[in-house]
Image (cartoon, rainbow, N blue to C red):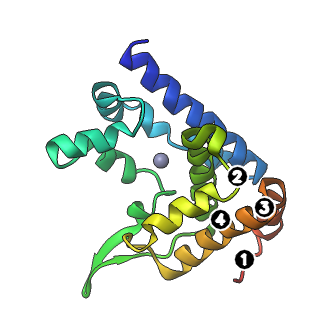
Amino acid sequence: MSKILSHLKTITRHKIKVTHLCFRCHLYKQGILHDLSKYSPIELKTGFHYYQGFRSPIDAEKEEKGYSLGWLHHKGRNKHHWEYWLDFGKDGIYACRMPENYVIEMFCDRVAASMIYQGDNYTDRSALDYYIQGRHRILIHKDTDRLIYHLLEYLANHGLDQTVEYIVKHRKTGFHI
Ligand SMILES: [Zn+2]
Protein backbone atom coordinates (compact mmCIF):
# COMPACT_ATOMS: atom_id res chain seq x y z
CA MET A 1 0.00 0.00 0.00
CA SER A 2 1.24 3.51 -0.70
CA LYS A 3 2.53 5.67 2.12
CA ILE A 4 -0.39 8.04 1.58
CA LEU A 5 -3.05 5.40 2.07
CA SER A 6 -1.19 3.79 4.98
CA HIS A 7 -0.90 7.09 6.80
CA LEU A 8 -4.57 7.94 6.23
CA LYS A 9 -5.55 4.50 7.50
CA THR A 10 -3.39 4.85 10.65
CA ILE A 11 -4.68 8.28 11.66
CA THR A 12 -8.29 7.39 10.90
CA ARG A 13 -8.12 4.15 12.84
CA HIS A 14 -6.72 6.03 15.82
CA LYS A 15 -9.27 8.81 15.54
CA ILE A 16 -12.22 6.40 15.45
CA LYS A 17 -10.95 4.67 18.59
CA VAL A 18 -10.46 7.93 20.46
CA THR A 19 -13.85 9.27 19.31
CA HIS A 20 -15.53 6.10 20.54
CA LEU A 21 -13.79 6.33 23.93
CA CYS A 22 -14.64 10.06 24.25
CA PHE A 23 -18.29 9.30 23.48
CA ARG A 24 -18.29 6.65 26.20
CA CYS A 25 -17.00 9.36 28.57
CA HIS A 26 -19.77 11.71 27.35
CA LEU A 27 -17.32 14.05 25.62
CA TYR A 28 -19.20 14.32 22.32
CA LYS A 29 -17.83 17.54 20.85
CA GLN A 30 -14.25 16.70 21.81
CA GLY A 31 -14.70 13.20 20.41
CA ILE A 32 -15.70 14.57 17.03
CA LEU A 33 -13.05 17.29 16.92
CA HIS A 34 -10.22 15.08 18.26
CA ASP A 35 -7.10 15.32 16.06
CA LEU A 36 -9.05 16.77 13.10
CA SER A 37 -6.07 18.99 12.31
CA LYS A 38 -4.21 15.82 11.25
CA TYR A 39 -6.19 16.13 8.01
CA SER A 40 -4.89 19.65 7.31
CA PRO A 41 -2.37 20.03 4.45
CA ILE A 42 0.59 20.90 6.69
CA GLU A 43 0.11 17.87 8.97
CA LEU A 44 -0.68 15.53 6.09
CA LYS A 45 2.52 16.64 4.40
CA THR A 46 4.58 15.39 7.37
CA GLY A 47 2.50 12.22 7.58
CA PHE A 48 2.78 11.27 3.92
CA HIS A 49 6.44 12.14 3.54
CA TYR A 50 7.74 10.54 6.74
CA TYR A 51 5.38 7.59 7.08
CA GLN A 52 7.31 4.53 8.31
CA GLY A 53 4.69 2.31 9.89
CA PHE A 54 6.45 1.47 13.14
CA ARG A 55 6.66 4.93 14.69
CA SER A 56 5.18 8.39 14.33
CA PRO A 57 6.16 10.28 11.15
CA ILE A 58 6.64 13.32 13.39
CA ASP A 59 9.56 11.61 15.16
CA ALA A 60 11.14 10.79 11.81
CA GLU A 61 10.78 14.40 10.63
CA LYS A 62 12.22 15.76 13.89
CA GLU A 63 15.19 13.42 13.62
CA GLU A 64 15.97 14.60 10.10
CA LYS A 65 15.26 18.32 10.39
CA GLY A 66 15.46 19.04 14.10
CA TYR A 67 11.84 20.20 14.12
CA SER A 68 8.50 19.20 12.66
CA LEU A 69 6.17 21.84 11.28
CA GLY A 70 3.40 19.23 11.28
CA TRP A 71 3.81 18.69 15.01
CA LEU A 72 4.13 22.40 15.83
CA HIS A 73 0.87 22.92 13.95
CA HIS A 74 -0.73 19.99 15.75
CA LYS A 75 0.25 20.82 19.34
CA GLY A 76 -0.80 24.45 18.87
CA ARG A 77 -4.37 23.42 18.02
CA ASN A 78 -5.12 20.33 20.09
CA LYS A 79 -5.87 20.99 23.73
CA HIS A 80 -5.53 17.34 24.81
CA HIS A 81 -1.73 17.65 24.53
CA TRP A 82 0.13 18.97 27.59
CA GLU A 83 2.45 20.78 25.15
CA TYR A 84 -0.47 23.02 24.15
CA TRP A 85 -0.60 24.39 27.69
CA LEU A 86 2.95 25.69 27.95
CA ASP A 87 3.31 29.43 28.35
CA PHE A 88 5.94 32.00 29.24
CA GLY A 89 5.80 34.27 32.28
CA LYS A 90 8.12 36.27 34.52
CA ASP A 91 9.74 33.10 35.86
CA GLY A 92 10.20 31.54 32.44
CA ILE A 93 8.30 28.74 30.76
CA TYR A 94 5.58 27.18 32.86
CA ALA A 95 2.76 24.66 32.45
CA CYS A 96 -0.83 25.89 32.83
CA ARG A 97 -3.35 23.71 34.63
CA MET A 98 -5.35 21.79 32.02
CA PRO A 99 -9.16 21.81 32.28
CA GLU A 100 -10.24 18.31 33.35
CA ASN A 101 -12.20 17.58 30.16
CA TYR A 102 -8.98 17.81 28.18
CA VAL A 103 -7.21 15.53 30.65
CA ILE A 104 -9.98 12.99 30.03
CA GLU A 105 -9.46 13.39 26.28
CA MET A 106 -5.72 12.86 26.83
CA PHE A 107 -6.62 9.69 28.73
CA CYS A 108 -8.72 8.45 25.77
CA ASP A 109 -5.92 9.37 23.36
CA ARG A 110 -3.27 7.50 25.33
CA VAL A 111 -5.40 4.41 25.85
CA ALA A 112 -6.31 4.25 22.13
CA ALA A 113 -2.67 4.73 21.10
CA SER A 114 -1.50 1.99 23.50
CA MET A 115 -4.15 -0.39 22.14
CA ILE A 116 -3.08 0.24 18.55
CA TYR A 117 0.70 0.18 19.14
CA GLN A 118 0.72 -2.78 21.53
CA GLY A 119 -1.80 -4.93 19.65
CA ASP A 120 -1.95 -8.38 21.26
CA ASN A 121 0.43 -7.28 24.01
CA TYR A 122 -1.93 -4.57 25.23
CA THR A 123 -3.04 -4.80 28.85
CA ASP A 124 -4.85 -2.38 31.15
CA ARG A 125 -1.39 -1.39 32.46
CA SER A 126 0.09 -0.45 29.06
CA ALA A 127 -0.90 3.22 29.03
CA LEU A 128 0.19 3.71 32.67
CA ASP A 129 3.59 2.10 32.01
CA TYR A 130 4.11 4.34 28.99
CA TYR A 131 3.21 7.44 30.99
CA ILE A 132 5.58 6.49 33.81
CA GLN A 133 8.41 6.04 31.30
CA GLY A 134 8.20 9.65 30.13
CA ARG A 135 6.78 11.33 33.21
CA HIS A 136 10.04 12.78 34.55
CA ARG A 137 10.87 14.39 31.21
CA ILE A 138 7.71 16.42 30.60
CA LEU A 139 6.66 19.89 31.70
CA ILE A 140 3.13 19.38 33.00
CA HIS A 141 1.13 21.12 35.74
CA LYS A 142 1.18 19.10 38.97
CA ASP A 143 -2.65 18.85 39.09
CA THR A 144 -2.75 17.68 35.46
CA ASP A 145 -0.05 15.11 36.17
CA ARG A 146 -1.91 13.90 39.26
CA LEU A 147 -5.19 13.47 37.39
CA ILE A 148 -3.84 11.72 34.29
CA TYR A 149 -1.77 9.42 36.54
CA HIS A 150 -4.82 8.73 38.68
CA LEU A 151 -6.99 7.83 35.67
CA LEU A 152 -4.33 5.59 34.12
CA GLU A 153 -3.74 3.89 37.47
CA TYR A 154 -7.48 3.42 37.91
CA LEU A 155 -7.55 1.74 34.50
CA ALA A 156 -4.65 -0.54 35.44
CA ASN A 157 -6.41 -1.58 38.65
CA HIS A 158 -10.05 -1.72 37.59
CA GLY A 159 -10.19 -2.18 33.81
CA LEU A 160 -11.72 0.03 31.12
CA ASP A 161 -15.45 -0.41 31.79
CA GLN A 162 -15.15 0.59 35.44
CA THR A 163 -12.81 3.48 34.60
CA VAL A 164 -15.25 4.87 32.04
CA GLU A 165 -18.02 4.60 34.63
CA TYR A 166 -15.80 6.39 37.15
CA ILE A 167 -15.02 9.19 34.68
CA VAL A 168 -18.69 9.70 33.75
CA LYS A 169 -19.60 9.86 37.43
CA HIS A 170 -16.97 12.47 38.34
CA ARG A 171 -16.64 14.45 35.12
CA LYS A 172 -19.05 17.24 36.05
CA THR A 173 -18.32 17.54 39.76
CA GLY A 174 -14.53 17.26 39.47
CA PHE A 175 -12.32 14.40 40.67
CA HIS A 176 -11.06 15.96 43.92
CA ILE A 177 -8.07 13.70 44.21
ZN1 LIG B 1 -3.39 14.73 19.07
In the rendered image, the vertical position of residue 113 relative to residue 133, given as above or below: above
Read off the residue under disc 2. 27
How far apart in space, not on screen, are marks 1 and 3 (Cα)? Answer: 12 Å
User: Left of 170 or right of it: where is 68?
Assistant: left
Residue 101, quarter of picture:
bottom right
Instruction: Determine whether label 3 and label 2 are within 8 Å by CB.
Output: no
In the rendered image, the vertical position of residue 107 relative to residue 42, given as above or below: below
The three-letter code of the residue at mark 3 reads Thr
Q: Along the polypeptide, which appears first: circle 3 or circle 2?
A: 2
Read off the residue under disc 4. 152
Read off the residue under disc 3. 163
How far apart in space, not on screen, are marks 1 and 4 (Cα)? Answer: 14 Å
Camera-near label (1 vs 4) is 4
Q: Residues within 10 Å of mark 1 (few under 14, many from 20)?
A: some
Image location of residue 93, percent across then percent down:
28, 77
Q: Along the polypeptide, which appears first: circle 2 or circle 4?
A: 2
